[in-house]
Structures are given as C-alpha cells and as structure tokens.
Amino acid sequence: MTEFTWRKALFICCMAGGILWFSNPISDYFFDYLADPNEMEIIIAKSWNKTIDSPKPENMKFHAIAIGINAGIDIIVKGTDLLKKLGTDEKEESTIKATDRESINNLRQLQEVFTYFHSKGAGGERFMNNKELFAKAVGMSKAMPGAELYVGGNAALMAQAIVQASAKNVHVLFGGMVGPGLSPMLNRRLIVPSKLKAEEDEYHIILEYVKDEKWAGHVCPIASRFIFSHDLTNSRMLASEKFIDSLKEFNPDMVVLTGLHLLEGQPEAYWKRRLAEIAASLAKVSTNVPIHTELASMANPAFVKALTERILPMVDSIGLNEQELWMTCQANGGPHCKPEYELDGPPSPGVSNDIIHWMLQQFSKRRIPSSRLSRVHFHTLVYHTVATLDSSKWRYGDSSVAAGARIASTQSCGVHSVHPAKVELRLKSTIPLTAGGLPENVEQPKDTRLDYSNPIISWKTSKISFFMTPVLVCQNPVKTVGLGDAISSMGLLHSGYDK
C-alpha cells in the first residue's frame, strides 16, 4: 500500500472515530476507560479547591450568623438490628410491606415506613405518636452495642458545621432549645441565649442502612438513614418566636431557619396556625439580611403546599434534596411530577433543573411581588445545583456549589480532604440541562459535556444563573446523618451577598 493510501485510510478512520465520538453514548465512558483509576477524581477535587479558595471581597462575607430552630440528641444505630430487638422476627419480616405514612402509631407502621425508605436507599424522617413505644425504642437504642450519640437536629448540625468551618471573628448564634445532655456536646463558640435553655433533651433515633443490605424482601440500593422521634418541643416549633426575638440584640447578617418539616406530625389546625405565626415572625427580619431555610423529609401534600406557599416567599434561599424537590413540585403542580408519579432514585439533571426553574418562577417576586426567594441549593447523590435570580444580591454560585459537593465527599467518607481512592464519579459525561419542562418562550439550554478540569457547569436561562457540579460519591459511607445540612451550610458559607 502506498504512503498516500495509508494517509487516506488514517484520515477516514479519524473522521469515522470523530463521528462516533459525538453521536454514540459510548464516548461518555471513553476517557474513564483510558484514565488512571483515580485521575478524574483528583482533577475534579483540585478544581473545587481552586474555586472555593479564590479571593472574595471582605464585605461580601458573613460575620454574624443566626441559626435555629430544631435541636436534640441523635441516637445512631443499625436500623434492622433495632427493629429485631423491638420484636420483628424472620416470619414477620417476610410479611412487611413498604408503605409511607405521615406519622407512625405502632411497631407495624414503623416497620413499614422504615422498609419504604430502606428499599429506596433514601433518607426519611417521621414523627411517632406513640410516646410509650418511642421511650422503649430510646432505651433499647442506647443499650445496643455500637450505638452512638451525636448532636442532632438540622439547626444544631448546621450551626456546628458553620462554626467549625469559620474563622474566630465569625459569630454564630444558635437558637434552639438546648437540654442538659446536648449543651456539653455543642461547640463552645456557639452563642446560646439563656431563654433557649431547656430542662430536658429531645431524642431522635437514627436507623442507618448500608448498600446491598437485605430487609423484608428488598435490597437497599444506597446507604442512607431513616429518622423517627416523639419530639414535641421541635415538632411544635416552640423555640421559633424566642429565636426571632434574639435577633434584635445579635444583629445577624444572615439567618438560617430549619425544622419546619417537623410540624407535619401535628394536627392540621395546629400546623396551619404555626405556619402563619412563623411567617409573621419572619416578616420582622430586615430584607437586607438574607434568610435561608432548609427543608427536610415530608409526606403530606397539603402540609407541603401550605409550607411552601406560606414560608418560601418569606425567605431568600432554600436548601433541599430530591425528595423535598419532588414533594414541593407535586404539591404545587410543577413540571415532571404529577401526583401519581413516584420518584425512583435521584432525578436526571434536566428534570431537576426544570423544577428549580419553575420554583424560582412560582415562589419568587416574578409571580409574588413581595417575595424574597431568589436562591435554590439542590443536592442529590451524584450532582448538586445552585440557582439564583440575576436580579438578586447572591454571589459566588460557583464556589458555593463546589463547597457543598466537597463536604459531601469528605464527610460521608469520614476524611478531612477528598480521598480519590474512596470516591467515584457517577455522573455521565453528557449532561442534559433540561428535560423539556421549561416554558416554550424560554431559551432552551442544550446538553453539555463534563470537563473534569473545570467541573462546575454554569449557564443562564430567563435571567436565572445555574451552577452545577458532579459529586465524588463515597463508595463506603461511614456516616449519612446530617449530610444535607453540611452541604447547605458550606454552600452558604462560601457564597456571597451584596450589602
């Protein structure tokens, strides 16, 4: 064969390869196959560090942060072990049906709700109405080998995460009811108003499960946890007014409000009244001070609708995972999530982006003139997204989403920095930015490809800025409790807000 023929053949092969590269999904995995085992993870982690550590103007940082409301002590145990101790034998286990409920009244319902979340590998939280059964479960949990007691409650966990990651000139007020057992567990730098000291502690039982664990005929796909409690202090939001009142003297430059989901376990008349009262309290906070609220597991569509309609317009930012995103969307008629649809694992980026876009249209000043909502921080297993209205005061969406993804990798693995050998990239290289759920008059973003050396993907749609990054998923998680709280905490701490 002549030299010309060889060159011609090589040219044809290159052209054919290029066509295959851009048209065939196999290209998504091409570099994964050729690269060193942890090369992509190393490149992504280094890029995150560079983005997070880039200089920010001093006047855009937060120096006085107030965080409330829910707090208590978490008892962390292996979920299936506790259920067996409470009286679940093998014969009974085989008859358990995976069923979700708004609250739990007896052991059978606890078994069914636990199985529901275990079978999905999803995190959940429900109120137990049965005081006697819960007290029995607390006693058994504390006595179990390997049981661990930790600071509990979204607010307490966020306060701990923020104060530990902040310089000493950053002051953090914690506005939750603090009992005698919780008090010595909290970081000494946290400021706890005297009117928020309690005589007794509230306990939450954390039932953890691991990937591939078998229970009631199901195999758990992802490590996570289910939480239950008989927590009257937090489920009635008894600290909310005291927390808001304490802001006058503290003078914060950011407020974080959590625990609203716990109201769901109360009678409808009660949670309707409390949501209205809390919304009225939030109206007292200056519009120059951003308010962030962290959502958590909910099951009652009527409650979710009332919470989102009452509270979201009163806050500037929300943090939530796929379950809360899905419930908010279903309860309010958003795209992709009709009431009969069930969420089966993390949604694709295109689906979640469409819902986030809808949320910032539905609950912001674009539809409600008095609304403050202008930022959404969405976190799921394999990727995170931060979206902000361009007209808002929020800044540094790139470092915010990177900081959240980094803490997800480190905290779940129990390490201080990303350990490439312990994590893996699960997000495919070709990423859909929409799933066809955007309004027709809105510019439709096109699919994009992940650049490992610049893993934060940013784009704009109808004057909303999106920042998305993959998560380096811990292969063998050592702790799942409080992960979402840590993600949102770091996202807020590394964001900026114009004064």
Image (tube, grey):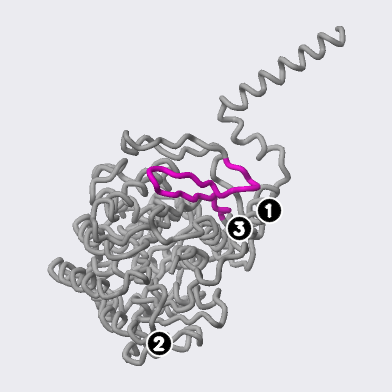
* Mark 2, residue position: 192
Label 3: state its secondary structure: helix
* Mark 3, residue position: 51
* Mark 1, residue position: 42
Mark 3 surroundings within 10 Å by alpha-carbon count, few (fewer than 14), some (14 through 19), many (20 or more)? some
Looking at the rendering, the stretch of residues picked out in magenta corresponds to 450-473
Tell me whether the residue at label 2 lies in contact with that at label 1, contact meaning CB atoms closer than 8 angstroms.
no
Asked if residue 132 can be seen in this view, the reply is no
Disc 2 versus disc 1: distance between alpha carbons?
40 Å
Indicate whether 233 appears above or below 356: below
Residue 372 left/right relative to 45: left
Name which residue lies at 59% across and 48% down. Answer: 455
Name which residue lies at 31% across and 90% down. Answer: 195
Label 1: state its secondary structure: helix
Give the image location of residue 5, x and y in percent.
81, 9
- Say whether residue 453 is magenta: yes
- Say whether residue 226 is magenta: no
Residue 281 left/right relative to 12: left
Give the image location of residue 274, x and y in percent.
19, 72
